[in-house]
Image (cartoon, rainbow, N blue to C red):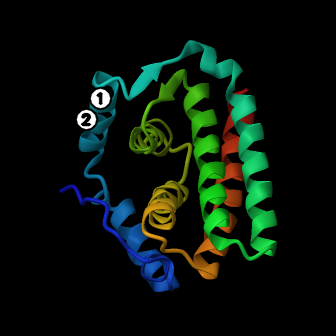
Amino acid sequence: MIIEPAVFSPTELLKSEKKDKEFLSLVSEGTFYGTDSLMKTAFDICLENKKILLFPKGKNLAGEEIQTAIEDLADAKLVLTQQRYHWATIQGYYAMVHTARALLFSAGYREKSHYCLTVAIEALYVGTGKLERELYAYLYAAMEMRANADYRTLFSEESARLIVKRAEEFLKKGQEILERSG
């Protein structure tokens, strides 16, 4: 069963720990995108549609992506102190995107779609046990929060702080994975 992304306000999406746990249980049960076999199909579809491409040079560029993630995270933290929650939400999300791109690059691929980036991370890192499903869920939730902030003007101080916190966790784990893979 595939559940389509829905529009949620930041408060609805991440208001309480209970909502987080409900969201994470959907993802961990494999019902968020579907079963593992469906996830592989989604990855294959992204490959077939050239939304994920082989990119052997990517291994040499992963470090640059991590540096960009570090800079985006620093910017997100700065604008939080300035109470610019819209921009903090966006920068926090992009810190996660650049971390995910670094991981994808290190696996020899590149993306042409944010959705396919999440599909690839799930297939290549969550499916292999290298990345916890909870951190993957943070990436997907951040994608929704960024879209809500950009296209629906739905953001809050609480959601901005949460996305920045999660971006920091995601970046740290991404760096650990890249260090281990050498």
Residue at 33% from the left image edge and 31% from the top image edge: 46
Please name the amino acid that badge 2 sits on.
Thr
Tell me if residue 142 comes above or below residue 153 in the rendering. Answer: above
**Residue 106 image-quadrant placement:** top right
Query: Can you identify the residue that label 2 sits on?
Result: 41
Instruction: Give whichever of 15, 103 is nearer the camera.
Output: 15
Q: Which mark is residue 58?
A: none
Residue at 27% from the left image edge and 31% from the top image edge: 45
Number of residue marks: 2
Residue 165, position in %: x, y? 69, 67
Residue 116, position in %: x, y? 39, 38
Residue at 45% from the left image edge and 66% from the top image edge: 148
Neighbourhood count class around disc 1 (C-alpha, 10 Å): few under 14, some 14–19, many 20 upward: some
Q: Is residue 77 left or right of residue 126?
A: right
Please name the amino acid that badge 1 sits on.
Asp
Q: Say which element carries label 1.
A: helix
Q: Is residue 69 left or right of residue 126?
A: right
- Answer whether residue 80 is visible to the viewer in this image: yes
Taking the view exactly as shown, the residue that stands out farthest to the left is 1
Instruction: Give whichever of 93, 23 is nearer the camera.
Output: 93
Residue 48, position in %: x, y? 28, 23
Q: Say which element carries label 2.
A: helix
User: Which quadrant would the C terminus be assigned to in this image?
Assistant: top right
Badges 1 and 2: C-beta atoms under 8 Å apart? yes
